[in-house]
Amino acid sequence: MKKKGIFEVKTHLSELLHDVQKGEEVLITKRGEPIALLVCYDKGRPNTLSLIDDFRQCREKITWGKGITKHAKKSSLLKETSL
């Protein structure tokens, strides 16, 4: 992994992007402190928002307890738990 300061990244961005396309990672620093990581964008990897949407859709299908969905009314939950 390469470590580069902001000024150097601005000056040599094209070269660094070429290196990143080849699989290299570049840690960008500001006054010696890491602030960003430059990595190649993977088109095959799903983005975070689509993963969150998929999770929410799966969560909606989950049933809790004796076949009760999370959207069931509280009164029906109370009746079944008292049995």
Image: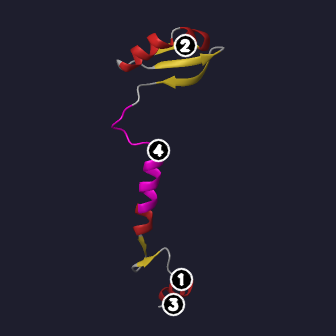
Q: Nearer the viewer, mark 1 or mark 3?
A: 1
Kindly indicate whether the residue at mark 2 contacts the one at mark 4 (C-beta within 8 angstroms): no
What range of the chain is rendered magenta? 42-57
Residue receiving disc 3: 79
**Label 1's element?**
loop
Task: Pick whichever of labels 1 and 3 is earlier in the sequence.
Answer: 1
**Label 2's element?**
helix
Task: Pick whichever of labels 3 and 2 is earlier in the sequence.
Answer: 2
Give amino acid for label 3: Lys
**Label 3's element?**
helix
Find the distance from the CA under tag 4 to the CA under tag 2.
26 Å
Q: Nearer the viewer, mark 3 or mark 2?
A: 2
Find the distance from the CA under tag 3 to the CA under tag 2.
64 Å
Residue 16: x and y in percent read 46, 13
Is-magenta flag for residue 53? yes
Find the distance from the CA under tag 2 to the CA under tag 1.
57 Å
**Label 4's element?**
helix
Q: Residue at position x 55%, y 18% from top? A: 28
Kindly indicate whether the residue at mark 3 contacts the one at mark 1 (C-beta within 8 angstroms): no
* Numbered mark located on residue 9 in the image: 2
The crowd level at tag 4 (other Cα within 10 Å; few <14, some 14-19, many 20+) is few
Relative vertical location of residue 31 with respect to residue 36 in this rendering, above or below: above
Residue 23: x and y in percent read 36, 20
